[in-house]
Amino acid sequence: MNLFNIFSDIEKLDGDVAERVDYYTRRNLFKLGRKAATVAAAPAVLAASLNDAYAQTATVADVLNFALTLEYLEDEFYRTGLATASLIPAGDQAVIAQISKHEAAHVALLKGALGTAAVAKPAFRFGNAFSTYQIFLASANAFEDVGVRAYKGQAPSLLGQTVLTTALQIHSVEARHAAMIRRMRGLKGWISDPAEAPAAVYAGEDNTTQAGVVLTSLSNVTGIDAARSREAFDEILTKQAVLAIAANYL
Amino acid sequence: MLSSNKDQQVAPGVFVSPEHPSMFLGRRLFLRYAGFTVAASGLLMACSSTETVQVTPSVVDLGSGDTGILNYAYALEQLEAAFYTQVIATPYANMSADEKTILTEIRDHEIIHREFFKAALGSSAIIGLTPNFTAVNFSDRASVLGAAKTFEDLGVGAYNGAGRLIKSADYLTLAGKIVSVEARHAAIIRDLLSARTANFAGDDVVNPTSGLDNAYTPSQVLPLAQPYVNNKISGANLPQ
């Protein structure tokens, strides 16, 4: 789960990273637009850019490899699920395949960025995650909701930087995944029940005060069930909380 | 350019009567209607010297800095809250119980977002906007859910793109707390439109190659939101 520290760790290692990433992403990557042909070339461009920017120091490669390791894990989790006979009902295959595609995209992006420095995919242990569809979905649910909360918690360390945008673009995709997985489990797409399990994943989600504003006391809100105020804001998880949760799954 | 003797020049070529309501709003509020000067200028040129100028301030300037970004979010939340309020007030035919629950809860989330920004902004908040949903057929499911998808995806892209413009870590976290809820809305609305398909995070909104959601600048978002608001919204002073 060290992906969630990656940007702040890069910052510690290289105070100029914001400028470097800003330069190489804006000038060399995003300028290419969103056409499939040019976007497909982005990992190679990014790899070349990072080689130029950092002279490929081992330390930076180590940090990026933490991220790649998590993406490997998520990618393998969904792909294994898809490949496990009789696990995912035919009607849900398209959804899981779409999530799996996004994880594979992240792996490709990071592998391309790291080039020959990329770590090989480790062997993961997923326990009984593929034993039943309900356990598979519950595992996916926890991964996605933790991911949303973890990215959110790290956002302030990226304040004012272009790389923040990329992190937010991943963050909202995690939220889309989370909502859809929740819906397939028969839950609301938004985090509503403060007693939802696992408790560590949802700790603090019962908050109804934001920036000192008591939501339930606002005009035009007083007649609305307090559950809506809990749901309307997703809460953060600290790095320590994320790592403690991750230990249960990795 | 002619004006009555009592009129005051507030900008080159622009005169406003002291009796005009804008004079009672104070300089700060008045300046928020920056584009008003442009509209007023054209109107005044058509006026005779003795006529009282009747101009409704029509341009809402979101402002600058973090306040501007919060007002930008407040404007989008006003739009969403008004939209879902109408959806529930005049439900389309055969709205299922599941859909009604979802759309009602989203309405309430958006109202809470709107009221939160209003309270957090205090005296810096922009006025309540007048929505214009003439493009939406509220009796038609496809029209309503299609508009909902547009608003939610636009909101997600707007928050994603605005994050970099925020100076305060606390405000950034707040934006983060809201954007993921908008993304959840988007996914569920998209599932209502196309159940159990890739549509919840479709290739049209999440880049299939990079796996990244959209991120839009205010200058990309505002022209897309403008058709749904009668007030002219200006983001000219927002951080770039």
Image (cartoon, rainbow, N blue to C red):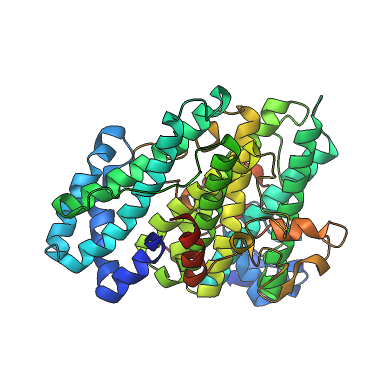
Name the residue at 66% across, 63% down: A205
Position of residue A80 in the picture relative to residue B200 (left or right):
left
Residue A79, percent across and down?
Answer: 40, 36
Q: Residue at (65%, 43%) from the top-left corner?
A: B228
Residue B97 horizontal/vertical position (percent): 81, 33
Q: Position of residue A219 (x, y in %)?
A: 83, 65
The N terminus of chain A, quarter of image:
bottom left
B153 displayed left or right of A80: right
Q: Nearer the viewer, residue A225 or B61?
A: A225
Of the 4 image quadrants, the one containing the C terminus of chain A is: bottom left
Q: Is residue B56 above or below residue A157?
A: above
Q: Which is more toward the observer, B176 or A187?
A: A187
Q: Nearer the viewer, residue A67 or B156?
A: A67
Q: Residue furthest right?
A: A223
Q: Is residue A60 above or below residue A167?
A: below
Q: Is residue B42 visible?
A: no
Give the image quarter of residue A212: bottom right
Residue at position x 25%, y 74% in the image:
A13
Picture coordinates of residue B126 (x, y %)?
A: 67, 64
Q: How many marks?
A: 0
Give the image quarter of residue A215: bottom right
